[in-house]
Amino acid sequence: MSASSLHSFLTGAGATAFLVAAVFFLRFWNASRDRLFLLFAVAFGALSLNRVLLALLEPTRESQPYLYLIRLGAFVLIAWAVIDKNKRA
């Protein structure tokens, strides 16, 4: 197995894991209608999209700024969701 194949496989596994987490939080949002779960689902969906884009692009092009902006947006969304939940509690 070449390094490129291994990188693609692991990137796909990461994308799948983030997508499973997004569906997991979406299920809890559907049951509780708590905004925290919806924001987490959106953030993990964005992280999954980031991994898919990494798999489609060359591995050496990870330094492209838009890939980091997707991650930054997801992490800001997670932080905002936690802060929002604590303010409402």
Image (cartoon, grey):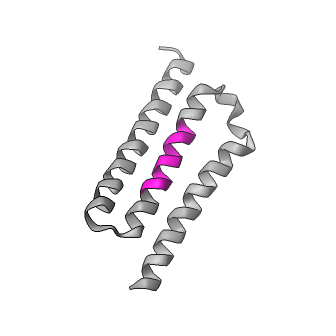
Identified at 64% across, 27% down, the residue is 57
Q: What is the number of callouts on the image?
A: 0
Where does residue 63 sit, x and y in percent of width and height?
72, 40
Where does residue 81 sit, x and y in percent of width and height?
48, 69
**Magenta-drawn stretch contains 14:** no
The residue lying furthest to the top in this view is 1
Q: In which quarter of the image is the C terminus?
A: bottom left
Which stretch appears magenta?
41-51
Horizontal relation, residue 8 to residue 63: left or right: left
Q: In this view, does 27 lie above or below 58?
A: below
Horizontal relation, residue 19 to residue 30: left or right: right
Name the main secondary structure of what is drawn in magenta: helix
Q: In this view, does 86 lie above or below 47?
A: below
Between 15 and 24, which is closer to the camera in this rendering?
24
Identified at 60% across, 51% down, the residue is 71
Q: Is residue 7 above or below residue 31?
A: above
Horizontal relation, residue 54 to residue 69: left or right: left
**Magenta-drawn stretch contains 48:** yes
Identified at 41% across, 43% down, the residue is 19
Where does residue 66 sit, x and y in percent of width and height?
71, 44
Where does residue 79 sit, x and y in percent of width and height?
53, 68
Horizontal relation, residue 6 to residue 33: left or right: right
